[in-house]
Image (cartoon, rainbow, N blue to C red):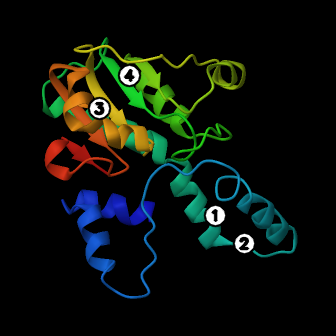
Amino acid sequence: MNELAIIFNKLGIDTEEVLEAAGTKWNFMPFRPGLVGGHCIGIDPYYLTYKAQTAGYIPDVILSGRRINSNMGAYVADELVKGMLRKRIHVAGSRILIMGFTFKENCPDLRNTRVTDILHTLKGYGAEVDIYDPWAAVEEAQAEYGITPIQLPEDGQYDAILLAVGHREFKELGAAKIHQWGKPEHLLYDIKYVLPADQVDMRL
């Protein structure tokens, strides 16, 4: 699904619109693109690929899928930076808010969260990045990743806002409140389709 999302983005096609159309088919399974963390998909396939390779078989499809998923964080960060540049927002020295740190929505689990990939890539561009996640335990985030999520964003502080995890609290906030955290000229990138397309600047 992530590979398809990348292709749709490059073609200028909204991925969610494609998925909604496909959803009219009775047997369609509604998978959405995004960050792939946790263990089931993020880690466990490597046990199978290792065993397959020791038996002399190269599982190209599984390895290719893992390679794409492992690079999604950097891809998302790069797309965010491109969006900021298109709006003439200076990236180095900017303040960016990432909404969500757990590996999936409505869950406190931080195991193998790929939000860290986005964070590190953005910091590599010279941005100052805050993490906000009402589901994430601050002590666990500090112990596992050396990251301290903020308690609540302040209004008018951010050059860019990234909706990285689709927590229900973020949906309940709504676009107006989330935009309020941004500076007068800011970018809102929603990779989880939390908000309608006409209320954000970019979607995955």
Q: How far apart are marks 3 and 4 (CA)?
A: 8 Å
Tell me residue 133's x, y (percent).
49, 29
Residue bearing mark 2:
58
Question: Residue at 51% of width from left, 56% of height from top?
Answer: 68
Residue bearing mark 3:
81
Label 1 packing within 10 angstroms: few (<14), some (14-19), many (20+)? some
Residue bearing mark 1:
63
Label 2 packing within 10 angstroms: few (<14), some (14-19), many (20+)? some
Q: Distance between the residues labelled 2 and 3?
A: 36 Å
Earlier residue among tags 2 and 4: 2
Instruction: Answer left or right for 182 relative to 31.
Output: left
Secondary element at tag 4: loop
Q: Are marks 4 and 1 in contact (CB under 8 Å)?
A: no
Q: Are marks 3 and 4 in contact (CB under 8 Å)?
A: yes
Q: Residue 125: which disc?
A: 4
The residue type indicated by label 1 comes to Leu
